[in-house]
């Protein structure tokens, strides 16, 4: 359970189940999800949990009471705990500790002051703690407190239950990232002039800028001639003939293509941000975010196989040019960490930002759902009821007038759906994995992509008079959620060094 669900939903679950039962339910849910190796790997990959540096091996963990031991031993290693201490343990607790330690994924210690209990526990745990030499049990969730405690190389730092309850399960991740040795952030001059030696972030930056350029070009064409020579050749009709067939048909094509162009620019902004702010700092999750999004976006050109065979040459050209750059951007694994993290700020600020993070993820998932729906419509009916209402006609009439109109519109519709899925995956993964205090680039990337994606879509609908409330409701909801998310998160993501730190 990530912090962006734990903290925003905790008051609700506490009110429904009671504080202690809700906390136990959260721990048990995570333990259930990670009970098998596949589940543990899936949770770690989904939430981008970092690997602890060698300096922290066996030195950062948690201390839990016996009643939570079984769930903690299964759940907390996935979150980043390198060891689990159970205790204090009495003779009656020995069977429970033995069961909890079965199938362990990290060292399990047991704490007791009774020599007889220590003897009974020895076969089942990795260490029996009878004295606290070299062990610090934290009760303060502040990350800087943990860092100061870990400064002693022979010290083991264990988070008490109160720390995880107050800070959330992401506490381990935040400590690990803060303790990971990092190097200086490279600049453009460090990339050099030889393309053969360019790092991944340069290629990612070129892909992003190329997408912005391609989207801008598509918008200019749509605002000008609308149709190019190959469009006219495929349809066997010019713009004037389409207008004569249905006076609203050309504006309808414009609305589809402007929305697509805005989505392309949004993707370009997302990729540019991921490259400059993520790949350049060697965040492992930035490469994964780019890979997940592009793995859907670039192959979407093949949608023509299911939409009647119309291939747009410029779309194909942009794909052919940018695809190799994309491969170069994601082919190499991240190198030495280059990130810079700010200390914890005020906890209320972080809590507000976590609520904003949840809203941004909900927005991304909503856009993903919309992209799947639009793609499906492009492959099947092509038009939805509100489209035909705007055109004041029916699909059969358009097919009778020109059999190629349907696959032509289907190409635009399905292509937009694929682009929307690609953008949604980038938004969702960036929002899930990139929320850190002082990461201004995350805020500006999301704000810029939202402006590029939403504003042209609303504007073109208003200009052509396609203002059906049902049709535009998802766009308005997306705008409202994005504005709320970015407003709640701005102080946290845009924090500056030395301002508001605890």
Image: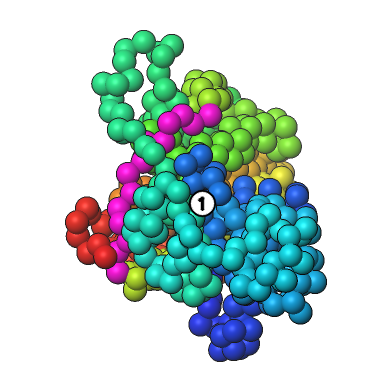
- Residue 345 colored magenta? yes
> Is residue 27 visible in the rendered structure shown here?
no
Which of 112/277 is in front?
Answer: 112
Q: Which residue is mark 1?
A: 59
Q: Residue furthest left?
A: 498
> Is residue 112 visible in the rendered structure shown here?
yes
**Residue 133, position in %: x, y?**
48, 60
Look at the magenta stretch and give its main secondary structure. loop
- Residue at the location (39% across, 25% down)? 202
Crowding around mark 1 (Cα neighbors within 10 Å: few <14, some 14 to 19, many 20+) is: some
Which of 214/403 is in front?
Answer: 214
- Residue 261 colored magenta? no
Q: Which residues are magenta?
A: 333-346
**Residue 384, position in %: x, y?**
65, 58
Say which element carries label 1: loop
Left or right: 223 with respect to 369? left
The N terminus lies in which quarter of the figure? bottom right
- Residue at the location (63% across, 87% down)? 17
Left or right: 420 with respect to 274? right
Eyeballing the image, is 10 above or below 353?
Answer: below
How many marks the image carries: the answer is: 1
Left or right: 410 with respect to 213? right
- Residue at the location (30% across, 56% down)? 343
**Residue 500, position in %: x, y?**
22, 64
Which of 176/4 is in front?
Answer: 176
Quadrant of res 233: top right
- Residue at the location (59% across, 66% down)? 130
Q: How is the image coloured?
A: rainbow
Left or right: 484 with respect to 322? left
The C terminus lies in which quarter of the figure? bottom left
């Amino acid at each position: 359970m990530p912090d962006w669900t734990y903290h925003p939903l905790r008051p609700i679950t506490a009110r429904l189940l009671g504080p202690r039962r809700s906390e136990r339910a959260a721990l048990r849910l995570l333990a259930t999800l990670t009970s098998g190796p596949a589940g543990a790997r899936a949770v770690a990959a989904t939430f981008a949990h970092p690997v602890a540096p060698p300096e922290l091996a066996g030195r950062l963990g948690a201390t839990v009471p016996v009643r939570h031991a079984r769930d903690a031993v299964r759940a907390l290693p996935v979150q980043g705990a390198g060891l689990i201490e159970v205790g204090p343990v009495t003779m009656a607790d020995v069977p429970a500790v033995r069961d909890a330690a079965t199938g362990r994924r990290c060292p399990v210690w047991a704490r007791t002051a009774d020599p007889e209990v220590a003897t009974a526990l020895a076969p089942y745990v990795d260490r029996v703690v009878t004295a606290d030499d070299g062990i610090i049990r934290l009760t303060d969730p502040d990350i800087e407190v943990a860092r100061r405690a870990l400064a002693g190389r022979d010290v083991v730092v264990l988070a008490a239950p109160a720390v995880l309850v107050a800070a959330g399960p992401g506490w381990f991740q935040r400590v690990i990232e803060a303790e990971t040795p990092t190097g200086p952030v490279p600049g453009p001059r460090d990339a050099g002039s030889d393309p053969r030696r360019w790092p991944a972030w340069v290629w990612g930056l070129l892909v992003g800028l190329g997408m912005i350029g391609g989207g801008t070009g598509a918008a200019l064409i749509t605002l000008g001639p609308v149709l190019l020579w190959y469009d006219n050749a495929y349809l066997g009709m010019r713009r004037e003939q389409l207008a004569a067939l249905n006076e609203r048909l050309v504006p309808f094509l414009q609305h589809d293509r402007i929305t697509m162009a805005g989505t392309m620019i949004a993707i370009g902004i997302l990729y540019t941000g991921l490259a400059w702010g993520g790949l350049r700092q060697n965040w492992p999750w930035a490469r994964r975010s780019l890979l997940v999004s592009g793995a859907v976006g670039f192959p979407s050109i093949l949608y023509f196989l299911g939409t009647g065979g119309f291939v747009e040459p410029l779309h194909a050209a942009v794909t052919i040019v940018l695809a190799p750059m994309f491969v170069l951007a994601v082919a190499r694994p991240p190198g030495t960490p280059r990130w810079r993290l700010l200390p914890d700020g005020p906890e209320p600020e972080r809590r507000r930002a976590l609520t904003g993070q949840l809203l941004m993820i909900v927005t991304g998932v909503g856009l993903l759902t919309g992209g799947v729906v639009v793609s499906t419509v492009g492959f099947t009916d092509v038009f939805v009821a509100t489209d035909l209402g705007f055109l004041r006609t029916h699909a059969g009439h358009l097919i009778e007038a020109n059999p190629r109109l349907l696959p032509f519109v289907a190409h635009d519709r399905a292509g937009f759906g694929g682009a929307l899925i690609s953008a949604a995956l980038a938004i969702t993964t960036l929002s899930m994995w990139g929320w850190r205090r002082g990461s201004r680039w995350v805020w500006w990337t999301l704000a810029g992509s939202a402006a590029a994606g939403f504003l042209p879509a609303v504007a073109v609908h208003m200009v052509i008079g396609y203002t059906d409330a049902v049709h535009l409701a998802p766009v308005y909801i997306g705008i409202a959620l994005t504005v709320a998310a970015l407003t709640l998160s701005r102080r946290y993501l845009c924090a500056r060094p030395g301002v508001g730190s605890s």
